[in-house]
Each structure stands twice: as structure tokens, then as C-alpha cells.
Image: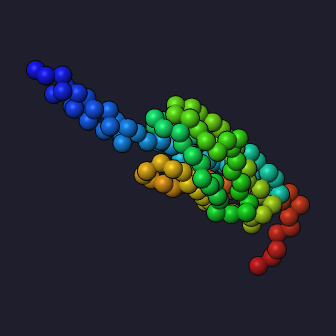
């Protein structure tokens, strides 16, 4: 068998591997539960975000559904195989008492899905000095 016949299948395999290489975002929790928090308090929690792909993961944007929720990380690029912390802060002074479901949106350069959504849940209780109003 000629070396040329071995070269072309090998070249095709190498090109195919490069074409299918991609970053992939994985999160340690798809839901962050702030549990019960008193009105006016601020609580911070962290989750891990990891690039389980084989190319660098670019964090193009991190947004939240409410001004009461912030999400931050110390990097905008995660090399393949690395893990970083996403710090999420909920400010209960900016929400009325009750149950709240909020969202964190992470836009990346991964092929599918380009947008990852993480939920955050908090039950805000009235402030200690709240006076019940008669009905």
C-alpha cells in the first residue's frame, strides 16, 4: 500500500478533529437558592463555571433579569478544562416581600447553546419593624 493512501485518511481525520473542536460551558448549579432572606439584606453565593470543551470559552456577556441580582467572574476567557467562580449577589432591599424567581444569562462563544440561563430563587420576608396593616 502506498504512503499516499495512508496520508489522505490521516489528513482528513486531523482536519475533522479541528473542525469539531469547540468550547463548552458547564455550571455546577442550574439553580441558585438564596432561601429566605429578610427585606433589606444582601446575600452572596458562588457557583462554579467550567469549560468542558477543548477550545477557549469566551464569556461575551453576563446579564441578569433584575437590578437586584448581580453576577460576576474574575475572567472573560476560560481555557479548556479550567474552572472559575461565578459570584452571585442578591439585594433584597430592591424587591418586595414574597417569592422571586430571577435569571442570569451567560452569552458565550460555544456553538450550542450560545446562551446559558441560570435561575436564582429567593423568598423575601418583611423587615423586622414592619407593621401589619389592617384589612
Q: Could you say where residue 54 lies in the image, as x and y percent from the top left?
A: 46, 35
Q: Residue at x 77, y 56 (%)?
A: 91
Tag count? 0
Q: Nearer the viewer, residue 113 or 11?
A: 11
Chosen colour scheme: rainbow
Residue 40 in view, yes or no: yes
Q: Is residue 11 above or below residue 26?
A: above
Determine the image quadrant of residue 95: bottom right
Determine the image quadrant of residue 2: top left
Q: Residue at x 73, y 63 (%)?
A: 67
Q: Is residue 130 left or right of residue 49?
A: right
Q: Is residue 44 left or right of residue 76?
A: right
Q: Is residue 106 above or below residue 97?
A: above
Which residue lies most toward the right here? 129
Q: Could you say where residue 26 lies in the image, as x and y percent from the top left?
A: 50, 41
Q: Residue at x 16, y 28 (%)?
A: 5
Residue 121 in view, yes or no: no
Amino acid at each position: 500500500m502506498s504512503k499516499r493512501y495512508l496520508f489522505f485518511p490521516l489528513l482528513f481525520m486531523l482536519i475533522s478533529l479541528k473542525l469539531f473542536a469547540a468550547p463548552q460551558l458547564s455550571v455546577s448549579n442550574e439553580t441558585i437558592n438564596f432561601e429566605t432572606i429578610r427585606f433589606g439584606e444582601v446575600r452572596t453565593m458562588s457557583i462554579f463555571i467550567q469549560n468542558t470543551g477543548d477550545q477557549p470559552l469566551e464569556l461575551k456577556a453576563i446579564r441578569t433579569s433584575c437590578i437586584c441580582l448581580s453576577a460576576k467572574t474574575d475572567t472573560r476567557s476560560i481555557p479548556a478544562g479550567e474552572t472559575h467562580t461565578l459570584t452571585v449577589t442578591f439585594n433584597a432591599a430592591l424587591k418586595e416581600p414574597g417569592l422571586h424567581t430571577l435569571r442570569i444569562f451567560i452569552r458565550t462563544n460555544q456553538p450550542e447553546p450560545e446562551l446559558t440561563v441560570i435561575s436564582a430563587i429567593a423568598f423575601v420576608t418583611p423587615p423586622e419593624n414592619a407593621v401589619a396593616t389592617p384589612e
